[in-house]
Amino acid sequence: MRKETEQQREAKLNACIAKVLSAMKPPENLTVSQWADKHRRLSSEASAEVGKWRTSRTPYMKEILDSFTDPKVEHIVVVAASQVGKSEALNNMIGYCIHQDPGPILLVEPTVDNARFYSKERIAPMIRETKCLKKVISAPKSRDSGNTVLQKAFPGGMLTLTGSTEAQALCSRPIRYLFGDERDRWAASAGSEGDPWGLALARTTTFYNRKMVEVSTPTIKGASRIAESYELGTMERWKTKCKHCGEYSEIKFEDIRFEHTVSGNEKKTFEIKSIWYACPICGAVSTENEVKKQPSAWFAEVPEAKELHKTRSFWLTAWVSPWATWESIILQFLQAGNDSAKLQVVYNTKFGMLWENRGDMQSEEGIMARREDYEAELPDGILVLTCGVDTQDDRLEYEVVGHGHFGEKWGIKKGIIMGRPDSDDVWERLDDVIERKYTFANGKTLGISLTFMDEGGHFTQEVRCRCAERQHKNLFAIKGAAGNRDIPYTTVPKRLKIIIGGRYIGEVWVYEIGVDAGKQKIFDSLRVQTPGANYCHFPRRDDYGKEYFKSLMSEHLVYDKKLKNPWHWEKIPGHERNEALDCRNYANAAFAALDPDLDAIDARLKQSVSKVSAPKKKPSVVKRKPKKEIFNDW
């Protein structure tokens, strides 16, 4: 056998040493975006654009990617619509960790099935197409390769994928890098172990250089985990410079205008004729192409959160996507029509907006936009006035509501009387409201037929006593019965005791109303879009401003299978006050309790108007013979 030459032995030794030195080589001094531009290649399975990754294609991603390598940031939150590249951004961070700064990585998807899909459709193609990753992660063919669907071993660490429902995987071993994908779709609890994010987060505490990344499309307002996390950070929005005024603004649906045509009957076809953008600051108009060519940048609402919480948070919409045209987004919006489920998808995945769970009802702003100028204090069509009064410890709130044929209603006056409900002055001012006459354009007046006042709170007996004194003014106390939609809206009143200072002083008639049924009626009527039957009119005045509509639309119907009566009304987060909703509910209940004959009232009102407006006849002159008296009959 031929002996190795000294040169051959030297070559082998050098190769061996080179491998050892290669493993000891420090990472390149690159940010994540620089690493991706240098190493990443996109596959046909995972991307519409195959080939080399270019951060310049999605300039809004550069700041997000590079915040991962900022030593002052340990928590990154990305709220993003679809078609903006958020999955590839996640992959770039994971790829950077594996190649440049290895450590144990945990990627959590909503379910294990989602994790398997992501591994096969996103992670595997990235490893295959990116040479530097392919070198450090073994091929999945070998039984001992350490490369399985849910685990990818590499020198210095391992990538583990799991679902938010798997408590054991979430709390089994320490991790340095935590990635949470589609956070709003995660389970509320990992089995019986509690919050999945909290469980996973606890595993990062042993690492001083830990990184946590949360990514998701937004979902429902008040129930969005990613929105909550976003508010912990810098709250950054991607804004574009206006070519006319030079100011920066975020592109929003409300500032995009378009003209379109509709054809077809059952299956409608939409054609967009023109689209333009109106700058919310100067009002000047630009095309989509002009807007997308303008300079853009991230603007932080809470920049100090980077220092205080080590958290940067970003919010992206599809309006800035290089792959989604404005026409395609608007078409999806039009095709959704009034289908709330389809509209939610468009709002979440395209507009990048939280969906307010109000069924198919308009937003507060949409209802407020319907306000109108009344021709008089009482518009024509009103036949009956009622009033609803809500009792608080430091005030009374009330609304006077007009009622017409077929459930049509008008808001007449919304007011607040400040003061404790045991104060004489407060009740005197309430008397001024319920005794007042309200005027039509023709001068005819109408008074309030019935007032319902909530007796709840800390002044129940005081309210009963004062209502007893005013029953001749048609003011009655009410008790609200909630928690069951089957409770009748109104029932026959009952006589209940009045106890003041522990002393019985009499009795009063009290109505019980099914407030849940009443709220459903209110929200059903708010859905009606055309004046007429069941439509709600509101005046364009300060007492019917933004706060009124926020309070009127402060609750929504939710389902909780753990409750005996699973459907119940709940305040929407951010809507602490619901007095306007209660006042309207009580005023409507008063009308239902009256059950008036509207045809008869209508006839009387018209008759009285005709009498008032009929011209007076001139007195007839009777010729008489002159008398001898020095004075005459006149």
Image (cartoon, rainbow, N blue to C red):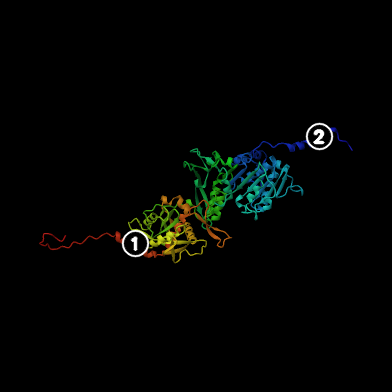
Query: Sequence order check: which comes first, mark 1 or mark 2?
Result: 2
What is the number of the mark on residue 98?
none
Indicate the position of residue 10 as horizontal and vertical percent values: 82, 33
Q: Position of residue 279 (x, y in %)?
A: 49, 42
Identified by mark 1, the residue type is: Lys
Would residue 406 be visible to someone looking at this image?
no
- For label 1, the SS is helix
Quadrant housing the N terminus: top right
Please state the horizontal and vertical placement of residue 483, each as a whole percent of the image: 52, 61
Foreground residue among 421 and 598:
421
Which amino acid lies under the numbered mark 2 shown in the image of this protein?
Answer: Ala
- Residue at far right of view: 1
**Label disc, if present, on residue 11 of the rendered structure:** 2
Q: Is residue 205 visible?
A: yes
Badge 1: few (under 14), some or many (20 or more) residues near its Cα, within 10 Å? Answer: few
Q: In terms of depth relative to the viewer, which is nearer, 417 or 484?
A: 417
Q: Is residue 323 left or right of residue 512?
A: right
User: In the picture provided, is 580 more to the left or to the right than 294?
Assistant: left
Residue 134, placed above or below residue 611: above
Q: Which mark is residue 606?
A: 1
The quarter holding residue 28 reads top right
Q: Label 2 crowding class (10 Å Cα cut-off): few <14, some 14-19, many 20+?
A: few
Spot occupied by residue 159 in the image (x, y as percentages of width and height): 69, 46
Q: Residue at x 83, y 35 (%)?
A: 9
Outermost residue on the front side: it is 502
Q: Mark 1 and mark 2: span between their CA atoms?
A: 112 Å
